[in-house]
Amino acid sequence: MSKIISGKELSAELKAAMAARVAEFPAKYGRVPHLAVILVGDNPASVSYVTGKAKAAAEVGIRNTTIRRPADISEEELLGLIAELNADDEVDGILVQLPLPKHIDEDKVIAAIDIRKDVDGFHPLNVAALWQKQPCTLPCTPKGIMKMLERAGVAVAGKKAVVIGRSNIVGLPVAKLLLDANATVTIAHSRTADLPAVTREADILVVAIGRPKFVTADMVGDGAVVIDVGVNRDPETGKLCGDVDFAAVEGKASVITPVPGGVGPMTITCLMENTVECFLAKMGE
Ligand code: GUN
């Protein structure tokens, strides 16, 4: 049997500690941190993520404003909204929920966010700082994954880590954080030859490919640590499932994260942490 790392439990602990800190902010700084979330359109997954963020903010005592705009908003209007939020002294963090509709240039939108309010850590200057090992806002999912590994007592240094997926949001930054923690890192993807042979070698396997139950038992080495970033609907049952076939892999891995209740809650908790950090930086802390 594998040890299951509950992102839900770890998140609850971290949020409780954060709430206690935030409760002291009005007396110290005159207000609480304020996160503005922009949601364009009504993609059900995005609506669900944004709702989760608002709920977590309420738990921690962070002020959350969700700004909804129709899917046909022009790029110019969206950039105008970001400029307003950049200029608003009482907004500490700005998050634009991705993906955006096709007619909007995502890179342009992300680059328009004031780097000091970039709670996602997606701004090109934050990305550059990460790759140069300089102080930066870390992207939430990779940050959450590293906290889960730490909590599970997984020693990363010297281990073989395989990351499946090379997205800007998860694959690339988590590979960099694992590298910084002295793992030997392989980034695998849809074009990797003989993927099962590559993944079987992993001591730590991070899966962020976005395909339901893609990782099967034969792709996992005995005793591996398996981190499942996927959030999918199981085409057979319609239930939420990860990129890993949990039931099949559970017996083989030494440590595994569940879906739901694994990486997802940690991503949201790290977003709250990043919002608090941006707020404190602004307050000169
Ligand atoms: N869409 C999927 N994951 C994320 C995330 O971490 N941040 C934003 N802004 N959009 C996302």
Image (spheres, grey):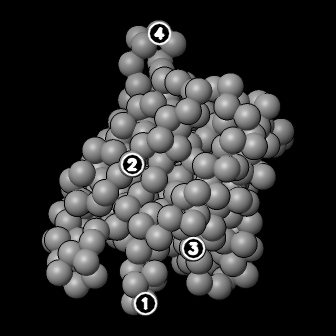
Q: Which residue is mark 1?
A: 284
Where residue 252 sits, quadrant-wise, is top left
Q: As rendered, which of 273 and 9 lies closer to the eye?
A: 273
Kind of residue at badge 1: Gly
Q: In what element is the residue under mark 4?
A: loop
Helix, strand or loop at disc 3? helix
Instruction: State the image coordinates of residue 76 (x, y, percent, origin top left).
Output: 75, 43
Tag 2 residue? 65
For the residues marked 3 and 2, what is the alpha-carbon distance in whole angstroms? 18 Å
What separation in Å lies between label 4 and label 2 (alpha carbons)? 36 Å
State which tag comes first along the sequence, 1 or 2: 2
What residue appears at the point 64 percent right and 37 percent down from the top-left corner?
A: 99
| Three-letter code, disc 4 | Glu
Residue 135 placement (x, y as % from top left): 59, 84
Q: Are marks 1 and 2 in contact (CB under 8 Å)?
A: no
Residue 236, label in figure:
4
